[in-house]
Image (spheres, grey):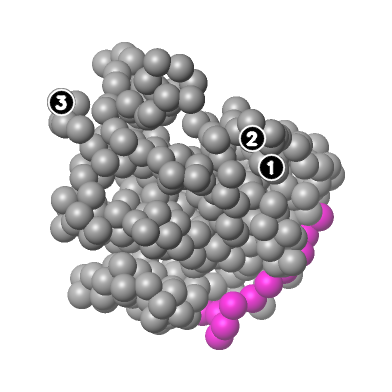
Amino acid sequence: MFNKQYDAAIAGGGTAAVLHACALAAQGRKVIILADSTSLMHEFGLSRLPLHAAVQLAARYPIVKEWIELLKAYDAIKDERIEPVFAQLLADVFVQSYGVDVLFEVIPLEIKRGDDEAGEIEGVVFASREGFQFIACKSIVDCTEQAILLRGLLNEKQLDSSSVATLWTLTCLELKRPISVEELTIYAANSRYEIQLSPSYWEGELNIAIAACSDNIENGKEIGFISDLEGLIVQIREQAHCGVGSLIHVSERAWSTPSFLLEQKTDSPITIAKGAWVASQDYSLVGIGCWTEAGHHYLNEICVSDKGGAALSFLIKGAMEAAEVSKR
């Protein structure tokens, strides 16, 4: 695999990375995904993209339509919900159908150019369990949450910690099935928790999606969340109309809204900014993320509990637009 010359290397293994990679492969390009986790589309189910939003995207973008049809074919959609584990497993099937290569558990580190910083892209250096390695490619797409490869090429502005929402997902036994999605707001210490309770894909289980906001950004991390969890479950049981049984699963942190904003700067190769994506003039460098100015303004208009699904929809649109424009 490492001896191949790729047309594009996609850093990040989320939904935007997968769909963008497949869109490029559909254009006849040789593509590889450098995923930092053990699975693809890891944030999809946890961010809870509503099925109706996915269907709207499918009507506009053929790649998304094919993906939704694959989920339906494997019975991964039930009662207007997409089962997150199936979505992740089928992501592997989907990229393989387009001939996209994938490396898991790697971290992209550096863009390698020719003779100088303005030279043509030669590839990307990444870290793996085997050490530092190199992939040769003609273009690079940064879909990482932290904009690992492009961050140094743009001006960075830190956002107020109270505006950052961290998303978690709990699974509880279901004592009484909710008629529809139920929403709660609970305050604990210096944190605010926006909560959505909804039926799980699996019978007898209840999904509890939680968005945590705090003046102290540490409270949104795992230790801060877990310390509040016992009291949070008690309050959810007291306030929810549906029956919340025993807690059976706590997800890892699903996703956080960006804590920074990236803007164009003088002498940067990044000169194009469109919604959820930025690019160099020749499209050899592309970045897709909610850390754009447009992404920041868009997410500010969405209620906290809906930010995960809204962000995912925003990223998918950006991934599809960037792929379409870059082929011209």
**Residue for point 67% across, 41% down:** 264
Task: State the count of labels.
Answer: 3
Residue of label 2: 154
| Residue at image coords 48%, 25% | 118
What residue is at 55 percent from the left and 85 percent from the top?
A: 179
User: What element does badge 1 sit on?
Assistant: strand
What percent of the width, then of the height, locates residue 185?
76, 64
Q: Quadrant of residue 240?
A: bottom right
Vertical order, 195 against 69 (above or below): above
Q: CA distance from mark 3 to mark 2?
A: 31 Å
Q: Which residue is mark 1?
A: 263
* Label 3 packing within 10 angstroms: few (<14), some (14-19), many (20+): few
CA neighbours of label 2 inside 10 A, class few (<14), some (14 to 19), many (20+): some
Quarter holding the C terminus? Answer: bottom left
Query: Can you name the residue that lies furthest to the bottom here?
Result: 179
Q: Which residues are magenta?
A: 172-187
